[in-house]
Each structure stands twice: as structure tokens, then as C-alpha cells.
Amino acid sequence: ILSSPADCVSCGKIMSGCKNMLYQQSKDGTGEICIWGRHVFMGYLEMEDATMEAIDEEGWLHTGDLGRVDSHGFLYITGRIKEILITAGGENVAPVPIENMVKEKIPIISNAILVGDKAKFLSILLTLKCEVDRRNGEPLDKLSLEAIQFCRKLGSHVSTVSEILELQDPLVYKAIQQGIDAVNQEAISNAQRIQKWVILEKDFSVHNGELGPTTKIRRHFVTQKYRKQIESFYR
């Protein structure tokens, strides 16, 4: 649909004869990407309800993707509507890019779940990289070799998640906070900064229900399972 003549990071600019718009834009210019033109399909075969849900009366296809357009007209996809967080201030926040950045900045982190829907600020649930029981996929308390090496470089001698939590290991906690600070420095607005975080006792797994069969995080399940930890952020 889109060509990218000058910016390979974006989806490119709209092609001649096609149209796009951002539906229900937030204050930061992010909205649902909708497209219109002869490249849009006619609908689902014998599925009128599904067709009406995807394509509106004016022929716009609602993709379910969130995006923004820069000053040069380049389109960027920033997330999915189903994954989006809407802060108390009404700003849309795509969690996946922020979560990925946290894992990139803090190598000891295995999984990160951003929370803060309808809240005044964002917080994040963190799990650490651990060994796994190969018989059932159950994450163990023992840190992975990579995580242990990370701790040793910091000067910490811990080797399990429980040790880190019981001691509130100052070296590990400081490194995590520094990583969070680095992520916040790249935030495009104050609403997208992470204010609080917590380390969970166990990494996520299919066996325990946090991950689906394809190892994709089940966000609703995770937020329900760790509801008490999330509520503690906002007391």
C-alpha cells in the first residue's frame, strides 16, 4: 500500500490513488490507521457482520493498528489498539516498544509488562532471566547464566531470584533503575515515562498461564494474576 522512498524505518508515504487517515487521534497525534482505495478488499465472503466491523460506510478499512504521521508525511506503526494503554490524561501509549526497550537496556530482564490503563502514570512488571525445568517448562528460581554474569559484572554474588528479592540487592536494583531511567530519557512525552516497577518472583511460562501456546504474553491474564502488585503502584 505504501512506498518508502526515503525513510526505511517508516512504512513510507501514501501512494497515488490511495488515502489514509488516523481515526480518533490522541493529543500526541497517534490514532488508528485507516486506509481507503481500490487496494482495499471488498469484504469477507458471507460474513457481513465482520465486513461491517472492518470497513465503515464510507469505505475506510480500519486496520486495528495504531500509528502516527511525521511532518514529512511518513507513516509509522506504533502498536495495536487491543494492546494500547490510555492514561488518565487521555494519552495513548503503545506498550510493546517501551517493553522491548526495557529488555534491551536491562539484559537481566526476561519479560516486561507495562501497566497504567486509566492511571495517572505508567508502571511495569518485570521478570528476570532464569533456568527452566526442561520436563515441563516451569521457570526455576535459579538465574540463567546470562543473568548471573550480569550480576557478577555489577559486583553482586546473588544466583537466584529469591536472593535478589529478599536482599533487595542494591547493585541489581540500581542497575534496573538506571535502565528504566535510560528508557525514560527516550520517551516522547511525560505520560510515557515509567514511574514505578517491581520484580516478580517467577518468570512467565506457558505452564503457569502467562504465555499462550505461541509464547505470546497473555496480558489480561497477567494483569489479573498480579493485580495486587499493580494496585500497590497506585495507592
Image: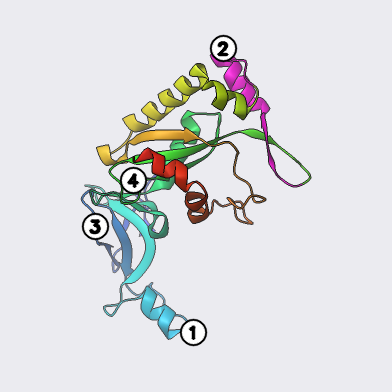
- Residue at mark 3: 25
In 3D space, how far apart are the residues under numbered discs 2 and 3 (Cα atoms)?
A: 47 Å
Spatial CA distance of label 2 from label 1 is 62 Å
Q: Considering the numbered disc 4 on the image, is that residue within a helix, a strand or a loop? A: loop
Q: CA distance from mark 4 to mark 2?
A: 46 Å
Q: Residues within 10 Å of mark 1 (few under 14, many from 20)?
A: few
Rendered residue at 44%/46% (across/down): 96
- Are the two marked residues, 3 and 1, in contact with CB atoms closer than 8 angstroms? no
Judge depth for marks 2 and 1 and give the one in front: 2
SS under mark 2: loop
- Which of labels 4 and 2 is toward the front? 2
Nearer to us: label 2 or label 3 = 2
Find disc 2 in the rendering and name its residue: 155
Query: As rendered, which of 39 and 208 lies closer to the eye?
Result: 208
Is 205 situated left or right of 235 in this image? right
Relative image position of residue 169 (x, y in whole percent): 53, 20
What residue is disc 1 on? Answer: 45
How far is mark 3 from mark 1, CA to CA?
A: 31 Å
Of mark 4 and mark 1, the one earlier in the sequence is: 4
Q: Residue at x 61, y 24 (%)?
A: 163
Mark 3 or mark 1, which has the lower sequence index? Answer: 3
Question: Which segment is the magenta one?
Answer: 136-158
Residue 140: x and y in percent read 69, 36
Disc 3 residue type (three-letter): Gln
Q: Earlier in the sequence, mark 2 or mark 3?
A: 3
Q: Is residue 51 magenta?
A: no
